[in-house]
């Protein structure tokens, strides 16, 4: 349940038309309640009946630039007028410059990019490249993860959304996660588990694929030494490290990428969402020079009609220029401290807040029905359930108070546009303060 949907409003004509002819994503279609959005500005969006909402989750944790990034909108219009589409065998100034820009802003020597149109496809490309390059077939990923919706990327996804697609693509094996609050394993023990797992799999694993900071499965931040050690472990066993930066990337953490928080350069990195500030659908998979060189004389058997779409690349280039020119990455770090302090206030006031965690403007508020025993309101299977749980009700109540906040499983996910101000944070915290009375009242 990613968006507040349990309100049973009367739908207007457009909403009814949409409901009749357009599938809702990850949903029982009978429960889909499309809400028509007619305007947006800064961190706010407005529905067709004039209700204004503060966007405390950047839609699906992707509208990093807010809803008024005029530089990106202009670049899109200019490129569409100049040349909307050419086959991937041709290039454009925006594609070449975006490739170079990504080599500049990504860590270490990551240098050559494969473009696609979504996070899912960025992960698919990473998996194929890792398998081709290593000549091995298996991918180790973790249970509390989301990597995409298509065959390969859903197979390496750990959260319950994968269950409907199982048995999935062979060779996708799962490891435990660094989840200090809710796992029986200590985060560093979970790493020992991966070490042993790789040893027992023998020399058959192409890559270990992780979100450096887990996003939709609850904003899980590992200890500082986790990611550097994971890279060593992967390399000791002849496997690559793939970092999925689709959600953590582009400033959310106060650094360009989640792996920058830990000073780690992966062998392959995937990006989407904030890459264009969500102004265009664009995915990207960047690799090291060694991996890029391998494909000089080995065919890269992968491609899409819209790989490197000029309008999407124009949006990506303009978005990165906006992050740089407006200092938004550093801003996210600074204002993230304020957000953390305000979330701490909520935790103090509300016994149902079991854990708060995160970095920069990427934060989770995990709820509990029993603070001592850390019992969740919603368990992982709720993701597939028709019934809403208490955490859904909290998000709905915040929405009724004018603040949109995404929630997954048992955690509210706070990931506003990087342009958000302290006053706007205060406004959203006031809405959450009201909404969290619901979970307080529902405690055991
Ligand atoms: N990887 C991660 C870490 C994600 O958060 C997501 C989307 N939430 C994806 C991959 C898939 O991206 P998309 O929805 O653009 O296909």
Image: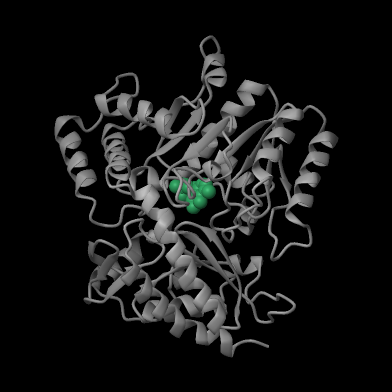
Instruction: Indicate the position of residue 324 as horizontal and vertical percent values.
Output: 32, 41
Instruction: Indicate the position of residue 314 as horizontal and vertical percent values.
Output: 26, 35
Is any atom of residue 23 visible in this view?
Answer: no
| Residue 423 figure quarter | bottom left
Q: Nearer the viewer, residue 425 or 179?
A: 425
Give the total of numbered labels. Answer: 0
Q: Nearer the viewer, residue 326 or 44?
A: 326
Q: Is residue 192 left or right of residue 289?
A: right
Identify which residue is drawn at 44% across, 66% down.
Answer: 339
Q: Quadrant of the C terminus?
A: bottom right
Q: Is residue 338 above or below residue 348?
A: above
| Residue 319 figure quarter | top left
Identify which residue is drawn at 75% across, 50% down.
Answer: 188
Q: Nearer the viewer, residue 434 or 12?
A: 434
Q: Is residue 115 left or right of residue 170?
A: left
Furthest residue toward top: 297
Q: Nearer the viewer, residue 199 or 31?
A: 199
Is any atom of residue 289 visible in this view?
Answer: yes
Identify which residue is drawn at 30% across, 76% down.
Answer: 11
Instruction: Indicate the position of residue 71 as horizontal and vertical percent values.
Output: 20, 45
| Residue 52 figure quarter | bottom left
Q: Is residue 163 above or below residue 425?
A: above
Q: How is the image coloured?
A: one colour
Identify which residue is drawn at 33% across, 77% down.
Answer: 402
Q: Is residue 246 above or below residue 420?
A: above
Q: Is residue 111 left or right of residue 192?
A: left
Instruction: Indicate the position of residue 318 as horizontal and vertical percent values.
Output: 26, 39
């Amino acid at each position: 349940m990613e968006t507040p949907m349990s309100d049973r409003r009367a739908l207007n004509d457009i909403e009814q038309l949409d409901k009749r002819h357009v599938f809702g994503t990850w949903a029982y279609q009978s429960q889909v309640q499309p809400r028509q959005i007619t305007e947006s500005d800064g961190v706010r969006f407005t529905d067709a009946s004039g209700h204004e909402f503060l966007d405390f989750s950047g839609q699906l944790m992707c509208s990093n630039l807010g809803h008024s990034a005029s530089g990106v909108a202009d670049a899109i219009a200019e490129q569409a007028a100049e040349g909307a589409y050419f086959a991937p065998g041709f290039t454009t100034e925006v594609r070449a410059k975006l490739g170079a820009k990504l080599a500049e802003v990504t860590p270490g020597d990551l240098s050559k990019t494969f473009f696609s149109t979504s996070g899912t496809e960025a992960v698919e490309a990473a998996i194929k490249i890792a398998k081709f390059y290593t000549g091995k077939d298996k991918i180790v990923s973790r249970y509390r993860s989301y990597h995409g919706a298509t065959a390969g990327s859903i197979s390496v996804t750990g959260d319950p959304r994968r269950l409907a697609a199982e048995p999935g693509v062979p060779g996708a094996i799962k490891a435990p996660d660094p989840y200090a609050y809710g796992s029986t394993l200590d985060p560093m023990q979970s790493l020992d588990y991966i070490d042993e797992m790789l040893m027992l799999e023998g020399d058959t694993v192409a890559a270990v694929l992780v979100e450096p900071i887990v996003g939709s499965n609850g904003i899980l931040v590992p200890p500082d030494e986790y990611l550097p050690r994971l890279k060593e472990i992967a390399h000791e066993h002849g496997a690559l490290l793939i970092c999925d930066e689709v959600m953590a990337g582009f400033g959310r953490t106060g650094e360009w990428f989640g792996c920058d928080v830990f000073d780690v350069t992966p062998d392959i990195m995937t990006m989407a969402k904030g890459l264009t500030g969500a102004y265009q659908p664009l995915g990207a998979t960047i690799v090291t020079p060694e991996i890029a060189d391998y494909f000089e004389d080995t065919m890269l058997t992968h491609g899409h009609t819209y790989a490197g779409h000029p309008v999407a690349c124009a949006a990506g280039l303009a978005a990165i220029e906006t992050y740089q020119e407006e200092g938004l990455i550093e801003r996210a770090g600074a204002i993230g401290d304020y957000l953390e302090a305000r979330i701490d206030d909520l935790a103090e006031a509300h016994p149902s807040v079991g854990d708060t965690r995160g970095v920069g403007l990427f934060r989770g508020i995990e709820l509990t029905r029993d603070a001592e025993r850390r019992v969740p309101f919603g368990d992982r299977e709720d993701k597939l359930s028709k019934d809403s749980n208490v955490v859904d009700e909290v998000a709905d109540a915040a929405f009724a108070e004018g603040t949109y906040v995404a929630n997954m499983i048992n955690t509210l996910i706070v990931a506003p546009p990087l342009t958000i101000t302290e006053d706007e944070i205060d406004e959203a915290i006031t809405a959450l303060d009201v909404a969290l009375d619901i979970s307080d009242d529902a405690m055991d």
